[in-house]
Image (cartoon, coloured by chain):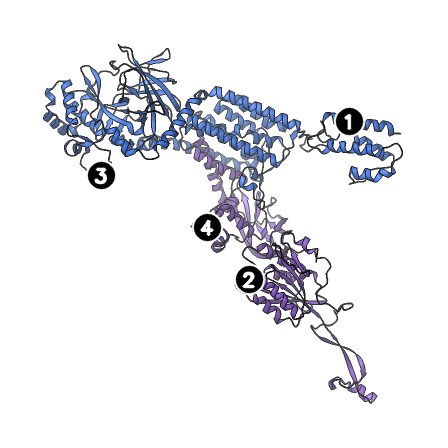
């Protein structure tokens, strides 16, 4: 490696600090810097570098695929970058420990190996290796200013080697300091830009689409409508006991309507739920609860749970903390990936608190419309129960379901259109209208969003919930308990299915099922400490086997203190200790020297006739062939042959030396 | 579609070229780091890659801001050699001096050769499916010389230094250099300030020549002892030998009147005629579209003959068809054989004339030539016909066919040269 001394060790240390993998960082640092002190090198050729590069490529692809199936994007990509220097360690070690100062770039680009007429580029892997360690350290998300300080110091150290010498030190320090300051400024700027972007363009950042993000605590009318075309599977639900489809899975509720947006006011996500005996308790119920198992996946972490009404306990969820807001939204703090939990449901239990004044407020813009309609239906005179029944009857009669159509710019307010003229819309209109009508009738009502589990899949042996099963309904407070009021015509699911499914849906479902099964199989790998230990063990075994093979092939060379191949040869690698040299010296002393540039066999053929009596030429030739193998065969001599060479030479010397 | 690909490849190669000139090796590593962390760090909550990205971008900006301050004046004197030989290295000296008041360091010398990217027609003819690797091969194949970048030593104020540049001539042709560029690295060592020094120069790369075994020129039945380097004129020359008695039939203008007056019988001056050999070297330039290798081998063989044949003893006419029928004569009072090599360096395949034009040019001079060496690009019907006609006119021939395909019914006097191993085939001459 042509890097400055200890630079690579510092980069490994930075990586170790950022990722917490101290053992691996220390081992890599030692292995990469040791060639500076140890005068030991391996004879590694270009073709071996080609093979090592192929091996590393295959390794990276395999690890990438495994990570993708275990963790899903984007976490898989980050983990891959975080572990990239370890995956490329064979190449880096080969460069550090070989006596080849530069390797041809064709080792990394396969098409270049096939093109004989190209220009040859060679490079030393020292600084690219350093760069990979630093970038990998950045992919691990340890927060704090320490990383930036470490980065600037390491970069300054590395740039020290590259600077032209004639410039004064100030000419180098000032641009560097300016760059460090500007880099810090850019970083803060990016963070502020992100915060601003989060406020301004919320839906654009929420790439998954099907998650109503409780951080935002708002949902626009049309948000669920836009999801209706997406056929992807998001949940798998298994029910037991008396729970039968369609099952409404609640995710978030909202209590405040203005413009065309429902918001959750005065409902922060606190407090933390108590955790005891591997379950979180949401409420207490009277009758024994029934289990509903949900398999979900969150690409970004910290998911919102989809729970049926009346969930009293959540068990089996691997999360640190569970939080709830007063409107019934439950959020878990857990890392991204596939997860599963069991919701124990008692339909009669009271899980949400008592209603507040927000649950009765009708916004000014809709007040006239809703009040008139309530009057027409005679709602204010009815009791809560009958009011609900009347509203349900009103919507069941004369209203139809139609798929979502984004409203134009200058259309009349959509709700009025829906209630009075078109009498057709999708679930959000039905739910909003129902909630406002009930509020006008004096019944506290909330707008609830979530999913509807209806479709049973035999392949999965569970109810399959797709993005287009996202639904909105109303929670009405009747007779001291909250109940679900769903006025959307029941055929909405089949209408959406006809609209959204296409010929490749079965293939997409199959693919989704395969990913799900693979994630289940690798569920044990989520425990990062255990996988690290496993892979470390595998890597150590591989390294040990590789080193043993190299040793067996006698490719070890001892080099002098300055890194040059030394005159003294050790451990028999170049055969310098062959006893045939003594025989040659004896023959030279007796007047038959080997000419300069003459090979041994030529020499023996030349002196053969002139050998005095007693020296047998054939024996010499046999000795010479053993000697050749010892010196030039990369595999070396077998121990038995080596003994034979030694013994024959000694015998010859004993017989023929004066 | 191909025009879009052509434009795209031109753009990519231009970007690559500018990046190679503008960034040092460390700078290239920083640029690739910017690209990688930029892609990785888009979501800034997931990783700290955006910190690395910001810092690297700031480093590059700081380096770029230093560049206008680095433009020091450096005087460069470069003498390109006039000729070089294809496939062999050549060297030349460059002298740099620093007239300014401050020392300069971190300099490199880059030779600005002419752009060898192909025109659109060549590109379209060369590849059916455009891909970048074939484009690179096309660009590299059009390069005539290759001059690597040279590091210049540090120059104190007022100091001068001389370096020797080792370059490689790749194929025959005329290489044009627009000048040199002196590149100076910034204090961080990432980017370079480029100071171009325009110095137009041409370099002729002669074709590769092979060693020919000793051979006899066709038709040289007479060998002049000691050569005939005596006369200064070309062609027939009459040398005064002496006086002799008049024989009936001698022309009256040869009578030497003074001797006639003294001897009282007619005396005539006797002349001896000297004949010079005039050999023709016929080069077939009608190459097929895929036969560039054979054409280059044929030119190399012609060049080998041109520099081996002793033009002090005979004249050599080089004939080939280019834009018109060209004939160049080397020998006493005419061109040197080195000039023939330079002419051969610039020969291009003829694509628009029919093969018969070569026959016509040969027959136009067949009265004057003692013998002819034909270097042909194949042994097809038209060429067989040409050789047959020349033979039937009594011209002594040496025929060499350069082709990779096997020749059926090869006559014994025909030498077939494999374009991949011309030296071996020529040994059988």
- Quick one: label 2, few (<14), some, or many (20+) residues within 10 Å? some
Specify whether disc 2 shares its chain with disc 4: yes
Residue at image location 81% in from the left, 30% down from the top: A582
Dividing the picture into quarters, in which one does residue A126 lie?
Answer: top right
User: Could you tell me which chain the residue with mark 2 belongs to?
Assistant: B
Q: Mark 4 points at which residue?
A: B6
Is residue B125 among the parts visible in the rendering?
A: yes
Disc 1 to disc 3, C-alpha distance: 98 Å
Query: Between A67 and B73, which is closer to the camera in this rendering?
Result: A67
Residue B400: % across, % down: 65, 60
User: Who's purple, chain-wise?
Assistant: B
Dividing the picture into quarters, in which one does residue A479 lie?
Answer: top left
Specify whether disc 1 shares its chain with disc 4: no
Nearer to us: label 1 or label 2: 1
Nearer to us: label 2 or label 3: 2
Q: Mark 3 points at which residue?
A: A409
User: Who's blue, chain-wise?
Assistant: A
Nearer to us: label 4 or label 3: 4
Q: Name the residue under label 1.
A: A644
Query: Between A420 and B45, which is closer to the camera in this rendering?
Result: A420
Specify whether disc 1 shares its chain with disc 2: no
Earlier sequence position, callout 2 versus callout 4: 4
User: Could you tell me which chain the residue with mark 3 belongs to?
Assistant: A
Q: Which mark is residue B350?
A: 2
Earlier sequence position, callout 1 versus callout 3: 3
Residue B152: % across, % down: 60, 45
Nearer to us: label 2 or label 4: 2
Say above or below: B215 vs B167.
below
Dividing the picture into quarters, in which one does residue A321 lie?
Answer: top left
- Per the image, label 3 sits on a secondary structure element best described as loop
């Amino acid at each position: 490696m042509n890097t400055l001394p200890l630079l690579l060790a510092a980069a490994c240390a930075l990586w170790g600090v950022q990722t917490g993998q101290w053992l691996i960082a220390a081992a890599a640092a030692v292995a990469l810097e040791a060639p500076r002190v140890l005068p030991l090198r391996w004879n590694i050729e270009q073709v071996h570098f080609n093979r090592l590069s192929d091996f590393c490529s295959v390794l990276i692809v395999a690890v990438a695929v495994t990570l993708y199936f275990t963790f899903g994007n984007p976490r898989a990509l980050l983990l891959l970058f975080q572990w990239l220097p370890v995956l490329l360690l064979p190449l880096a070690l080969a460069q550090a420990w070989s006596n080849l100062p530069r390797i041809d770039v064709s080792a990394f680009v396969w098409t270049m190996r096939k093109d004989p007429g190209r220009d040859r580029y060679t490079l030393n892997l020292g600084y690219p290796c350093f760069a990979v360690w630093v970038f990998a350290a950045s992919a691990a998300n340890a927060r704090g200013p320490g990383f930036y300080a470490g980065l600037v110091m390491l970069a300054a150290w590395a740039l020290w080697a590259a600077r032209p010498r004639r410039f004064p030190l100030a000419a180098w320090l000032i641009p560097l300091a300016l760059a460090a300051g500007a880099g810090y400024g850019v970083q803060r700027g990016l963070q502020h830009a992100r915060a601003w972007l989060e406020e301004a363009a919320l839906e654009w950042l929420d790439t998954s689409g099907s998650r109503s993000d409780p951080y935002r605590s708002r949902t626009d009318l049309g948000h669920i409508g836009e999801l209706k075309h997406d056929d992807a599977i998001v949940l798998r639900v298994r029910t037991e006991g008396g729970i039968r489809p369609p099952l409404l899975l609640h995710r978030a509720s909202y209590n405040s309507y203005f413009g065309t947006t429902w918001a959750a006011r005065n409902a922060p996500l606190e407090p933390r739920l108590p955790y005891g005996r591997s379950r979180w308790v949401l409420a207490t119920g009277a009758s024994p609860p029934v289990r509903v198992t949900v398999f979900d996946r969150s690409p970004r972490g910290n998911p919102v749970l989809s729970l049926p009404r009346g969930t009293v306990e959540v068990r089996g969820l691997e999360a640190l903390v569970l939080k709830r807001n007063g409107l019934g939204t439950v959020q878990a703090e857990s890392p991204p990936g596939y997860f599963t939990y069991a919701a124990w449901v008692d339909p009669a239990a009271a899980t949400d608190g008592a209603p507040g004044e927000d649950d009765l407020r009708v916004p000014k813009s809709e007040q006239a419309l809703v009040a008139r309609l309530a009057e027409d239906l005679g709602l204010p005179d009815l009791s809560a129960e009958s009011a609900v029944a009347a509203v349900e009857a009103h919507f069941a009669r004369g209203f139809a379901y139609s798929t979502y159509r984004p409203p134009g710019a200058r259309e009349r307010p959509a709700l009025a259109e829906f209630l009075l003229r078109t009498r057709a819309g999708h679930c959000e209109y039905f739910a909003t209208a129902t909630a406002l009508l009930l509020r006008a009738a004096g019944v506290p009502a909330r707008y609830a969003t979530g999913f509807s589990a209806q479709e049973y899949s035999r392949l999965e042996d569970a109810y399959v919930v797709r993005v287009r099963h996202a639904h909105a309904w109303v929670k009405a407070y009747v007779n001291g308990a909250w109940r679900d009021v769903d006025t959307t015509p029941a055929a909405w699911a089949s209408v959406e299915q006809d609209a959204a499914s296409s010929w490749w849906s079965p293939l997409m479902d199959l693919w989704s099922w395969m990913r799900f099964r693979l994630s289940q199989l690798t569920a044990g790998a989520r425990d990062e400490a255990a996988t690290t230990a496993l892979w470390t063990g595998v890597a150590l075994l591989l390294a040990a086997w590789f080193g043993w093979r190299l040793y067996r092939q006698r490719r070890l060379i001892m080099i002098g203190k300055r890194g040059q191949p030394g005159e003294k040869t050790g451990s028999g690698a170049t055969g310098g200790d062959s006893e045939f040299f003594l025989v040659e010296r004896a023959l030279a002393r007796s007047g038959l020297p080997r000419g300069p540039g003459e090979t041994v066999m030529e020499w023996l053929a030349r002196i053969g006739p002139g050998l005095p009596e007693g020296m047998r030429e054939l024996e010499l030739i046999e000795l010479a062939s053993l000697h050749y193998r010892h010196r030039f065969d990369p595999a070396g001599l077998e121990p038995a042959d080596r003994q034979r060479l030694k013994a024959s030479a000694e015998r010859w010397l004993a017989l023929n030396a004066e | 579609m191909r025009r879009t690909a052509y434009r795209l490849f031109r753009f990519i190669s231009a970007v690559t070229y500018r990046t190679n000139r503008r960034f040092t090796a460390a700078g290239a590593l920083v640029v690739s780091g910017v690209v990688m962390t930029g892609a990785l760090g888009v979501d800034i909550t997931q990783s700290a890659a955006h910190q690395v990205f910001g810092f690297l971008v700031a480093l590059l900006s700081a380096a770029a801001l230093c560049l206008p301050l680095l433009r020091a004046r450096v005087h460069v004197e470069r003498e390109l050699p006039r000729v070089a030989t294809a496939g062999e290295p050549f060297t030349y000296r460059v002298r740099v001096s620093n007239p300014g008041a401050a020392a300069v360091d971190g300099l490199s010398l880059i030779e600005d050769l002419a752009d060898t990217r192909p025109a659109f027609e060549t590109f379209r003819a060369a590849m059916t499916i455009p891909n970048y690797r074939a484009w690179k091969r096309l660009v590299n194949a059009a390069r005539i010389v290759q001059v690597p970048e040279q590091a210049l030593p540090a120059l104190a104020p007022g100091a001068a230094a001389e370096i020797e540049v080792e370059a490689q001539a790749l194929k025959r042709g005329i290489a044009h250099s627009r000048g040199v560029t002196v590149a100076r690295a910034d204090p961080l060592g990432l980017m370079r300030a480029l100071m171009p020094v325009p110095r137009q120069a041409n370099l002729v790369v002669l074709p590769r020549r092979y060693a020919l075994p000793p051979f006899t020129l066709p038709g040289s039945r007479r060998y002049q002892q000691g050569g005939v380097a005596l006369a200064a004129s070309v062609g027939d020359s009459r040398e005064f030998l002496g006086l002799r008695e008049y024989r009936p039939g001698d022309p009256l203008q040869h009578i030497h009147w003074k001797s006639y007056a003294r001897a009282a019988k007619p005396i005539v001056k006797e002349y001896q005629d000297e004949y010079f050999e005039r050999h023709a070297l016929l080069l077939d330039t009608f190459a097929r579209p895929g036969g560039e290798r054979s054409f280059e081998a044929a030119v190399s063989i012609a060049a080998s003959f041109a520099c081996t044949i002793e033009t002090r003893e005979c004249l050599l006419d080089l004939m080939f068809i280019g834009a018109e029928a060209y004939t160049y004569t080397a020998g006493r009072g005419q061109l040197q054989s080195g000039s023939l090599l330079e002419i051969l360096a610039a020969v291009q395949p003829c694509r628009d004339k029919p093969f018969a034009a070569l026959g016509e040019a040969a027959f136009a001079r067949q009265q004057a030539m003692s013998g002819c060496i034909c270097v042909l690009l194949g042994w097809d019907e038209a060429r067989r016909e040409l050789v047959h006609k020349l033979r039937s006119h009594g011209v002594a021939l040496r025929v060499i066919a350069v082709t990779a395909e096997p020749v059926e019914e090869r006559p014994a006097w025909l030498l077939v040269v494999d374009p991949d191993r011309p030296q071996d085939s020529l040994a059988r001459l």
